[in-house]
């Protein structure tokens, strides 16, 4: 069990959303994946997260509305960038919106609640890969835009943590160079 988990961590990599196609996880597989995703460390057991699914026509409509919004906000956007915006949601058959639901009345700092919601997003990447799917965590301007939050019907105490694009990899994604442990580990001494 330990070896399998380490193997997953050691081989985890994103698959760019443009390289994700059908099929997406079916309903039972998605439920299995997301039940695992929600098992996150959670100070105060606040469960400060929720997940929205975007698929089919709703996903395409969401993508089209984002493209309209970005064009309205940036009328001088170069055509190549407009094209990119228009097609962002066309590829992966499933997009999960991981939302942080912040409990402002809690003693637990907002930062920690965000970390917990981020763990849900990360677990989702791991769960997807462990079941043979590919996934990519994307943010971009839409994550931080309150018009997009309204489109998603988020409450004032909610914000997007990320859009997790999920599907079946259409090509093998080469791994990238990984940080060397020695560059990121040191021993503190008094
Ligand atoms: C919070 C967060 C937001 C990200 N947003 C983007 C993004 O908007 N666009 C992008 O190309 N990559 C984004 N990435 C990076 C990719 O998800 C991915 O991690 C990166 O391409 C490296 O690949 P790897 O996951 O295989 O290490 C984001 C990653 C994180 C953690």
Image: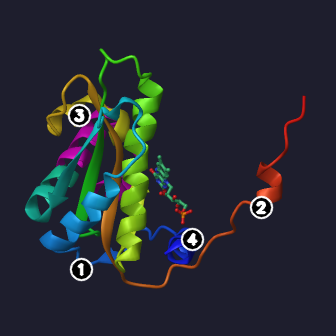
In the image, 114 versus 97, the foreground residue is 114
Task: Indicate yes or no whether the magenta region holds residue 104.
Answer: no
Badge 3: few (under 14), some or many (20 or more) residues near its Cα, within 10 Å? Answer: some
Choose mark 4 or mark 3, whichever is in front.
4
Choose mark 2 or mark 1, whichever is in front.
2
Residue ID for mark 3: 149
Residue ID for mark 4: 6
The segment highlighted magenta reads: 65-87
Disc 4 from disc 1: Cα separation = 28 Å
Residue ID for mark 1: 22
Mark 2 and mark 1 lie on one chain; the one further toward the N terminus is 1
Disc 2 from disc 1: Cα separation = 35 Å
Q: Is residue 45 above or below residue 15?
A: above
Residue at 40% in and 62% down: 125
Choose mark 4 or mark 1, whichever is in front.
4
In the image, 134 versus 186, the foreground residue is 186
Q: Secondary structure at mark 1?
A: loop
Image coords of residue 177 (percent x, y): 69, 68
Disc 4 from disc 2: Cα separation = 17 Å
Residue at 47% in and 28% down: 111
Mark 4 and mark 2 lie on one chain; the one further toward the N terminus is 4
Disc 4 from disc 3: Cα separation = 36 Å
Q: Residue furthest right?
A: 190
């Amino acid at each position: 069990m330990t070896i399998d988990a380490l193997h997953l961590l050691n081989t985890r990599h994103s698959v760019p959303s443009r390289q994700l196609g059908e099929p997406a996880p079916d309903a039972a597989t998605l439920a299995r994946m997301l039940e695992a995703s929600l098992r996150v460390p959670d100070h105060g057991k606040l469960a400060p997260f929720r997940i929205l699914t975007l698929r089919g026509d709703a996903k395409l409509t969401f993508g089209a509305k984002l493209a309209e919004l970005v064009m309205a906000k940036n009328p001088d956007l170069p055509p190549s960038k407009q094209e990119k915006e228009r097609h962002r949601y066309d590829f992966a058959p499933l997009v999960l919106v991981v939302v942080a639901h912040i409990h402002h009345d809690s003693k637990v700092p907002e930062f920690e609640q965000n970390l917990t919601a981020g763990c849900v997003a990360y677990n989702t990447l791991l769960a997807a890969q462990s079941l043979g799917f590919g996934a990519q965590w994307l943010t971009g301007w839409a994550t931080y835009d309150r018009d997009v939050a309204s489109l998603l019907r988020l409450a004032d105490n909610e914000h997007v943590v990320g859009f997790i694009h999920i599907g079946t990899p259409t090509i093998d994604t080469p791994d990238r160079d990984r940080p060397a442990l020695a560059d990121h580990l040191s021993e503190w001494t008094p």
